[in-house]
Amino acid sequence: MAAEPLVLIETHGAVRKLTLNRPASLNSFTSAMHRELRAALDAAADDASVRCLVITGAGRGFCAGQDLNDPEVGTNVGQVVERIYKPLALRIASMPVPVIAMVNGVAAGAGANFALGCDLVIAARSASFIQAFSKIGLIPDCGGTWLLPRLVGRAKAIGLAMTGDKLSAEGAERMGLIWSVVDDAALQDQTMALAARLAAMPVKALAATRRTIDESIMTDYASALSLEARVQNDMGAQPDFREGVAAFLDKRAAKFSDR
């Protein structure tokens, strides 16, 4: 009997949904699940029919971080970060479509930072975020040291990382760590509705927006303005720009197709 997939894959129109599927372990990462997740992400990136990606967890958790019982991890934690988590974070950051993390429960350690690396994080009211690394003598990884201070500032980033305290979904929203909080019963419907909305938008421009904002964070104001001009020049040459202008002038809904 074949083992159940560690990543469930569903397609809803132009939206691809990936579900981390180790519910008994709160979907904690193993090397095997990483391999299935990376393959699913690459497949979504290569599929021109996919225009938005939603990532969630099965059961009562989103992802509890690294499974410390995974025999493939061993004691060389730095090698695991370099070999697995760095490529995962960079794959999310380079997806050609918007990526939504639908956080249905606890997101801890690398699981929390994996979610925060997505474009939008929508959390159930019962969800929580924990930078659990300090509890086992480590530092935030999966992009956490880069993401946290840029999302909430140095003081709060250090506080979250050093204390390892559990942060409620509502607290994360107030802090600016995530996009929005919704009632648990509404999480699925509201997330998929947003995903469908993004899928109908000019996704090539949305992916370029993510990339340009991330690059602008690391440069000065004048350089950011020049970057905007270069990217805008590229976007202005795309069919979606022509379609958007034509739809505006014709007072009709635009039908975007670039990716």
Image: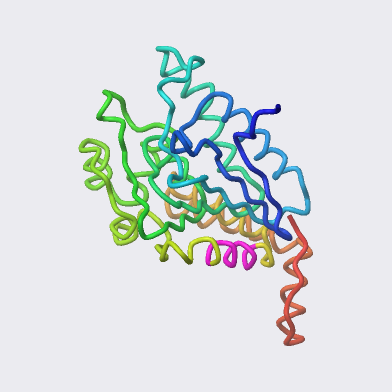
Residue 63 falls within the magenta-colored stretch:
no
Whole-percent x, y for residue 168 in the image: 29, 53
Camera-side residue of 72 and 51: 72
For the C terminus, give its image quadrant: bottom right
Camera-side residue of 195 and 58: 58
Q: Residue at x 42, y 65 (%)?
A: 182
Q: In the rendered picture of this protein, how many numbered marks are placed on residues?
A: 0
Q: Which residues are magenta?
A: 190-198
Splitting the image into 4 quarters, where does residue 112 fall?
A: top left
Whole-percent x, y for residue 183 in the image: 41, 65
Residue 194 falls within the magenta-colored stretch:
yes
Spot the residue most to the top.
75
Left or right: residue 205 versus residue 165 is right
Camera-side residue of 117 and 240: 117
Whole-percent x, y for residue 81 in the image: 46, 24
Camera-side residue of 222 and 18: 18
Instruction: Relative to 81, say whether 144 is above or below.
Output: below
